[in-house]
Amino acid sequence: MCRITPKTLANAIHELSRMSVGDQQLLADEIYRAQPNLLASVLALSSFDVHVSRIEFALRSLLLIFLAMKRSGHTWPIITEDHQAECFKELTDWMIDSEKPKTARELRVEAQRSLKHPEKYLFAHVLSETRDYLARLPTALESDRYVMFAVFNLVECIARPQSGELTRR
């Protein structure tokens, strides 16, 4: 069951679109207090020689995801570094597997996986935004892969909270 509904996601998208830079900075401060490891995973992109303009996409994605989390009526536990690593391993295993040639049956199974994603609306939105973002880039860089992994790992971490600790407010 999705905790982030289409309506919640739409409201978060609208709210973020109306935020000033100052409002976004305040939201980033709130993320630092509530989910410091998620923020750190985006800021760490600079250590992989990711240009600041590309980090901005990941940061904007985090702002949106956090707004959706806040507006969902649920409280997420602090995402730990260990949980991020577990989600990242699952994500990379899936991404590596998705690059292999597939039979028609395997493609159907993969499509069903997306439809059964615990946060399928958020996943679909982030997938669409990431595709649009990558298509707009003048030149693809190897470091863009890091941005993609970071953004999708944010989704995975909140879609699969550790130890079922998610609570309803």
Image (cartoon, rainbow, N blue to C red):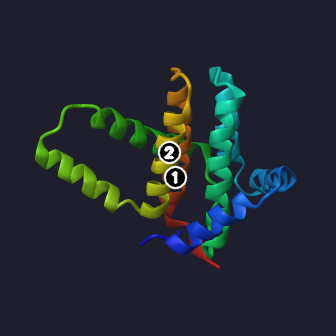
Q: CA distance from mark 2 to mark 1?
A: 5 Å
Q: Residue type at mark 1? A: Val
The answer to whether residue 5 is seen in the rendering is: no
Q: Single out the residue that lies furthest toward the bottom.
A: 169
Quadrant containing the N terminus is bottom left
Residue at image point 71% right, 59% down: 16
From the top left corner, tell me how far across and down residue 148 is, in percent. 51, 37
Could you tell me which residue is drawn at 46 percent across and 41 percent down?
131
**Closer-to-camera residue (107/166):** 107
Residue 103: image quadrant is: top left
Rendering coords of residue 95 (x, y %): 36, 37
Q: Are marks 2 and 1 in contact (CB under 8 Å)?
A: yes
The residue pinned by badge 1 equals: 155
Q: Residues within 10 Å of mark 1 (few under 14, many from 20)?
A: many
Residue at point 83%, 55% (across, down): 20
Vertical side of 150 occupied by 27: above or below: below
Nearest the viewer among 33 and 149 is: 149
| In the depicted structure, whether residue 52 falls above or below residue 36 | above
Q: Amino acid at mark 2?
A: Phe
Left or right placement of residue 89 versus residue 100 in this view = right
Label 1: element kind: helix
Q: Which residue corresponds to mark 2?
A: 152
Residue 42 x/y as whole percent: 66, 39
Residue at left offset 44%, top offset 56%: 124
